[in-house]
Image (cartoon, grey):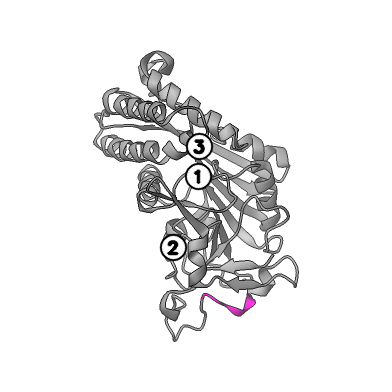
Amino acid sequence: MPGRTLPPLNGSNGAHEDDEESNNDSDYESEAPDATTALEELSPDEFPAYFSERNGRLFHSATSPYPLPVDTPEQTRLNTLAGILYRLTGAPYIGPVAELLAPQPESERRQMVLDVGTGTGRWVIEMAQIFPHVHFRGFDIVPIATRYPPRNVQFELHDVNAPGPMRWAAGMFDLVNTRFVDMAVLDYTELAQEAGRLLRPGGMLMSYEWSRLPAFDPAMGQDPNVHAPASVQFFSAINAALAARRVYQLAGHVPAFLASTGLFTDISAREYHVPIGPWPADPALHDIGVACLSAQQEYARSIRQLLLDSGGGTQHAVDSLVDEYLHEINSVRGLVSILYMVHARRL
């Protein structure tokens, strides 16, 4: 099946007319694993077929197990999470990315980055501005990303769970970014193996995943089962509904998946306990906590449809589950959301 690209708005390719290189650069064919793979542009009138509306929320209509909406409130939540990451790390990446993507004027090989599950494309666009000499590719199962990308960016449509290799040649990419993909990917080992194929030796994989288990700040020593029972019930219901779709939690397990492939080395993992709510005394953590609380509130509203679809309870029961969770995160001090960041080098 040919790759599909998002069409430009108003006939523009997102680049200035006098740029020597446009988004539709002529060497796309060389990115494919075989000469028969071609790119086909998605026409604007095809967009509605990718979406469906349920209970006032917009969802993808594809075969992906991803259960969350793809509308403006959900995209705002994802942007809030991206802002939290930036506050924690000071950059839209982790590890030695600046060194990895430093300009190589003497090399004829162009530097390439791939973003898996690109969503709005915000990360790709931010990175493309930081590294204007690098070529970026982002893909998702539905056309959410902007059609006004920078000239060094191309967005495409692709199902991450589709069988077989992706269309790009082995060793093409310097960096593969997998961020918040655990509700979309059925087999992370397969994704890690494919990332290993796509990465050049010495290239890097990045992973960011949020835990789907309630937790307290370690300094408080509190048991969620005792002090946050609504959160325990809420996430237990979510994890059971996702397991029915063969979707299992990645957070905390990515290093083991990467190691199991035998393709990666220098696997580095870091765990952040991100406050939920304004309870931290530290001003920076206070602001992060306010942002995280907002994201968790929207997450609870966005996940309602999954809980309804799972058949685990009536609408009243689901509403009560969500409401009790919202009340708890607004009133209980010390709750945190655990964020796992991982980066690894391709052997």
Amino acid type, callout 1: Phe
Going by the numbered disc 2, the residue's amino acid type is Ile
Disc nearer the start of the sequence (3/1): 1
Figure label count: 3
Predominant secondary structure in magenta? loop
Task: Identify the residue at image location x=53%, y=60%.
Answer: 101
Residue 98 in the image, given as x and y percentages of width and height: 49, 56
Mark carried by residue 125: 2
What is the span of residues highlighted in magenta in the rendered image?
Answer: 23-27
Could you tell me the amino acid type at mark 3?
Asp
Q: Earlier in the sequence, mark 2 or mark 3?
A: 2
Residue farthest to the bottom, as pictured: 18
Seen at 37% across and 46% down, the residue is 77
Disc 1 target residue: 180
**Position of residue 176 measured from the top left corner of the image (x, y, whole percent):** 58, 54
Measured along the vertical axis of the image, is residue 300 above or below residue 15? above
Whether residue 25 is in magenta: the answer is yes
Answer few, some or many: residues within 10 Å of disc 2's Cα (few below 14, many 20 plus, some between 14 and 19). many
Disc 3: CA contacts within 10 A as few (<14), some (14-19) or many (>=20) = few
Between tags 2 and 1, which lies in front? 1
Q: Nearer the viewer, mark 2 or mark 3?
A: 3
Is-magenta flag for residue 288?
no
Mark 3 — residue? 309
Q: CA distance from mark 3 to mark 1?
A: 22 Å
Q: Is residue 190 visible?
A: yes
- Residue at the spot x=35%, y=49% of the render? 73
